[in-house]
Amino acid sequence: MAKALAEWDGRLLVRRAAETLRDAGCAPVVVVVGARAADVRAAAPELTCVENPQWPTGMASSLRTGLAELAGTPAEAAVVLLVDMPGVTSSAVRRLAAIAGPEALAMGGYGDRRGHPVLLGRRHWAGVAAAVTGDRGARDYLRAHAGQVRVVPVGDVADDADLDVLTGLSHA
C-alpha cells in the first residue's frame, strides 16, 4: 500500500498532512506523489499533486520534485512534512512558518532531538536539491549548515513518531 493511501484515525495520511499544512496557513500546499499516484489523486482530488516518477529511489527525489514545483511560485520558503508522521500538528508547522523567509533554515525540536517539520528558505532550495540522495532527504544539507539552522521547540504540541517504525509501512 502507498503510504499516502493509508488511514490514521479514519483519515487518509495524504489528506491529514495537507490539512495540517493548510490549517497552519501554508500556501500553496503541494503534495508529491509516487507509488500509486493515480490512486492518490483519485482518493484526494482536491489536493494539488505533482508526480515523482523516481519515487523508488527514496525521499530525496520527492524533495527535489516538490522544491522544483514550488520554484514556479512566489513562495519564500517551503515547509517539508512527511505523510507518515501524523503526530506533527498545525501548531508545530505554524511555529516554523512564523520564521519563514528566503534565508531561513529550521527544524522542529523535540527535547534533545531534531525532526519534522523542516523549513527550507528559497535561497537554500538549489543547494538542498543538489545535496539530497536516497532516503536521506535534507539531513546532510542541514548538518553542513548547522550554524544557520534554527531549532524551534514543538515537542509540546506535536509528536514526531514515524509510522514506518511503528507499523512497518513501506514505499510500495
Image: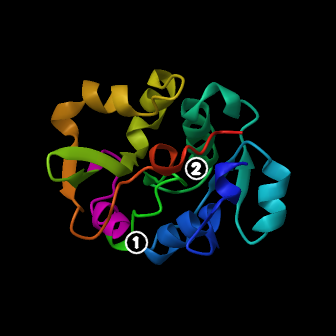
Q: Is mark 1 on a helix, strand or loop?
A: helix
Q: Residues within 10 Å of mark 1 (few under 14, many from 20)?
A: many
Q: Is mark 2 on a helix, strand or loop?
A: helix
Q: Looking at the rendered structure, which numbered label has been put on residue 90?
A: 1
The residue carrying pointer 2 sits among few (fewer than 14), some (14 to 19) or many (20 or more) residues within 10 Å by Cα, namely: some
CB atoms of marks 2 and 1 within 8 Å = no
Q: Is residue 49 left or right of residue 82?
A: right
Residue type, label 1: Ser
Tell me the residue at 33%/54% (across/down): 101
Name the one closer to the observer, 154 or 104: 154
Above or below — where is 142 with respect to 117? above
Q: Which label was assigned to residue 70?
A: 2
Hey, what amino acid is under mark 2? Answer: Leu
* 78 displayed left or right of 144: right
Q: Which residue lies furthest to the front in this view?
A: 167
The answer to which quarter of the image holds residue 14 is bottom right
Residue 125 position in % (x across, y down): 46, 37
